[in-house]
Image (cartoon, rainbow, N blue to C red):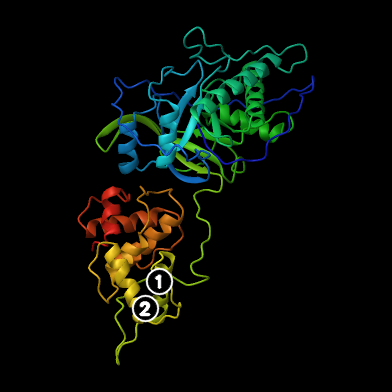
Amino acid sequence: MPTRQPLAVSTVRLISAALGVLLACGVLVATYEHPAPKAPIGATPVDLRADTPNPVTPGDFTGYGFDQCLAPSQKAMNRWMSSSPFLAAGIYISGKSRACRDQPNLTPAWIQHQLQAGWKLLPITLGPQASCSPRYPRYGDDPTINAAPGPEGLYGKARKQGRAEARTTVDVAQRLGITAGSTLWYDLEAFDIGNTRCRKSALAFLSAWTTGINTLGYESGVYSSAGSGLKMLDDARVNTPDAYDFPDAIWIARWDGVANTSTSYLRDDGWRPGGRMKQYEGGHNETWGGVTINIDRDYLDLGKGSFAPEEDHCNGVNINFKTYGRLFPPTKTYTPPEGQVRAVQCLLTERGRYEGKLNGVYNDATIAAVGAWQQAHGFTPRTMFGPRDWIAMHMDAPDSVLKVGSAGPVVRRLQRALHASGVTTSLKVTGVYGAATATAVKAYQALVGLKQTGIVNPRTNDRLDRGVL
């Protein structure tokens, strides 16, 4: 299963009767969906912001994810959001061949809650599988891909199946509240791509699936093993680029334990930049926040990747410093640094606490605004503005769980707060939560006596919001 950001929608092309495609036989890499756990964890009530539309998923993202057969309970998702390294979650929403046909947790409210909590969802369909797959049909009422070439060799029946599966998937996605523009993933399990009819019918099916998904306003993604389904697509992309419509993104199943989007089975240029993710570790149990789930691990690099738009404060006032000092009222021997005073004036202006000039002078108006902000924030008003104030003012924003892959203004606030805390002087204020930010968060957590997770969870957020040192 992969995820990526919109690429251009392909044009539907007819395949000529004389078309013959010779594809190399790939090494088969077995990939399986997970069996359902013995018992789901109980759900907990949630408060939804009904007036907030669901975002496109997964959108632009670089980071870690997991996929699992049965959509986890709300309690499990809450615990994993605040304690696990993952921000993306694969869920099986449709397909007669999926192992978890019954999804008791999978409702529009569940989808809405996860997206509003910050999860990047990866909706998966496991419908008709390759005609030569050794594991399908699974139930007897789940058809495989029709391998009949047809009178013109166009595999018309397979194409018809692909179009039908696309319509079904989009219908399910829409009923669940998954927004147009989101990526919908087709899970094509491993098969022998050396079997010509099996391979060509699978290509025809996936081509029609992609055309159908794109036509209905969504992005097409295909999950398969690196050595079978995705090698088949990559070879066709290079050798017969005009013969098929190809997915907008690929999800590589390659259990090599390496968290990247590379594999020797595929050429480096395909679906890059921004069109790949990799399932790099197969089924195993992981426990986060006291909740155990059997998962695969994934690494995503989709769309533009995690990024934060440029920002401006008070028409160009610099508020980024390697260290943030204490500011006192000026004396005959001390003048507060102009740049940092101007930064405080700007931050207070943005919070509606200061209406004076941004002149870099720590004057009476600035001191009064500092005191008013301190009192409103629960601090004792004083004339000094110190590290505790810097930390709290930078983190003066709605609480969010932040981890590798998070991006946006709130991450910039965090990065500035970490500088103000003194645990780092070298962290770049990019607005993207990467490994360096996680390391600085661990240092801050150690400083204030918290478990060193590298994740800004509610307890860490509380310490930062209060400027604890």
Mark 1 surroundings within 10 Å by alpha-carbon count, few (fewer than 14), some (14 through 19), many (20 or more): many
Q: Label 1, on which residue?
A: 354
Using the image as rendered, state which of residue 164 and residue 241 is in the foreground. 164
Specify whether 357 is left or right of 422.
right
Residue type beneath disc 1: Tyr
The x and y percentages for residue 89 are: 42, 35
Residue type beneath disc 2: Ala
When the figure is inspected, residue 310 is found, relative to residue 331, above or below; the finding is above
Label 1 near label 2: C-beta < 8 Å?
Answer: yes
The x and y percentages for residue 146 are: 63, 13
Dividing the picture into quarters, in which one does residue 199 lie? top right
The x and y percentages for residue 107 are: 43, 26
Which element type, helix, strand or loop, lies under badge 1?
Answer: loop
Residue depicted at x 40% and y 71% = 354
Q: Label 2, on which residue?
A: 365
Which of pointers 2 and 1 lies earlier in the amino acid sequence? 1
Specify whether 184 is left or right of 364.
right
Q: Which residue is farthest bottom?
A: 332
- What is the CA distance from the residue labelled 2 to the residue labelled 1? 8 Å
Which element type, helix, strand or loop, lies under badge 2?
Answer: helix
Residue depicted at x 64% and y 31% = 214
Mark 2 surroundings within 10 Å by alpha-carbon count, few (fewer than 14), some (14 through 19), many (20 or more): some
The label shown at residue 425 is none
When the figure is inspected, residue 317 is found, relative to residue 451, above or below; the finding is below
Using the image as rendered, state which of residue 250 and residue 109 is in the foreground. 109
When the figure is inspected, residue 219 is found, relative to residue 449, above or below; the finding is above
In this orientation, does residue 320 appear?
Answer: no
